[in-house]
Every structure is written in structure tokens, then in C-alpha cells.
Amino acid sequence: MRCLAASEPNFAINGYASVADWQQAGTQEGMLIVLLCATGRKSTEAAVRRDLKPVVHGIAGARVIVVSDYEEPAEIVTALEHGAMGYIAMSANLDVAVAAIRLVRAGGTFVPASGLLAPRASAAANPPDATAKRRADGLTQRQLDVIDRLRQGESNKIIAYKLNMGECTVKVHVRNIMRKIKARNRTEIAFLTNELF
């Protein structure tokens, strides 16, 4: 808390020993970002499975970020599935943590690189042709075109212009692609479809 307050004077910061203490304080009004901090495997698992949902559902519009020294990719995914908008590893430096908070505050999702390394390792265990075939199953040529442009970092507006379609159509394609390949964001789409390109 002291480090965040010193580095970001624009942040109004309050700290509590537990979610119960925070709820009793009744200061949830107007909060945009909630950092749910835990250390160690058991503490992190308890925070994600027990404390995360009440916090996420307890405040309208709040975005929750789990901060932990436990960087197991499966736990990061579980945190996101339970409503977290970010997961900051305690091994990250303060600048990365502040940037992640800003990203989540702006509506983005932050995941440490370790959260993406496990899927890559499992993809490497499968032959590339088999993995690529599984990823391509169910994707239309138009969706593959959208993925190709998305992998180049282009916005929906630019993709729409280059592929001669409406921006809303691009959004629908991106949403359908995410559903089909079980991706949570544009970065995961690019990563999970890497072998197709």
C-alpha cells in the first residue's frame, strides 16, 4: 500500500486485513479497483475460491485484481473464471503492478506471462499439424482472415476497413472466435492460433 501510494498520488488507497474487515468498514462505494492479496498456495486458492466472488458481486462496477506469489497458470485461469480482471505476480516490479492496475481500470485484463506459458508447453507436446487442425476446426475463412489481422495488432476499426466489413461484424467474429477456441481476450486468440499462421 505504501509503495502504491508513494508512486501514484492520484490513487486513493485503503487497506484491510481481510475481506470481512473490508465489508464491515462499509467503504466499498465508488471503488473501481480492488486488490485481493494472498501469499502461498493455500491462501491464494482460498482467496480465489472463497473471497473473490463476494467481492466481484458485492460492488457494482468494481474490477478485482488478485495479487499473489503463487503463479500457477491453472490458478490464474481459475481467478479469471471467478471474475478477476487481473492477476499480478508478487515477483513483478512496482511499475508493472501500477501499469496492470491502470490497464484493468481502463477495462482491460492483465495476466502475467507465466499464465500463458503452460498452454504453450502443452501445445508443444502435440504435433503442430494436429494442433493446427484442431484450432482450424469450426473456423470459417472469414474468421481466419480476422485472426490474421488481429495477430498483427490491428484494431477492430482497421480490420473492418481492410476486410471490407462493418466494425460490428468484426466484433461478432472476434466474439465467436473466442468462444470456439476458448480464448478470453485478443492476446489469447493470437497465441492459441499461432500455429495456423
Image: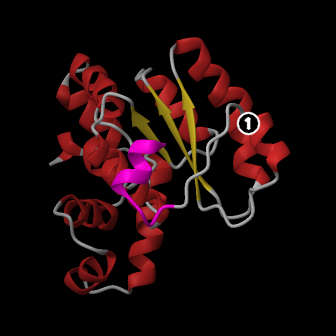
Mark 1 lies on residue: 19
Instruction: Specify whether 181 is left or right of 148.
Output: right
x and y, in percent, of residue 148 in the image? 20, 61
Q: Residues within 10 Å of mark 1 (few under 14, many from 20)?
A: some
Q: Which region shows up in magenta?
A: 1-11
x and y, in percent, of residue 46 in the image? 67, 21
Name the amino acid type tagged 1. Val
Q: Residue at x 42, y 67 (%)?
A: 173
Q: Closest to the observer: 69 or 170?
A: 69
Instruction: Specify whether 132 is left or right of 173.
Output: left
x and y, in percent, of residue 101 in the image? 43, 54
Q: Residue at x 19, y 40 (%)?
A: 195
x and y, in percent, of residue 71 in the image? 40, 23
Q: Is residue 30 above or below residue 24?
A: below
Q: Residue at x 30, y 21 (%)?
A: 122
Can the viewer see residue 110?
no
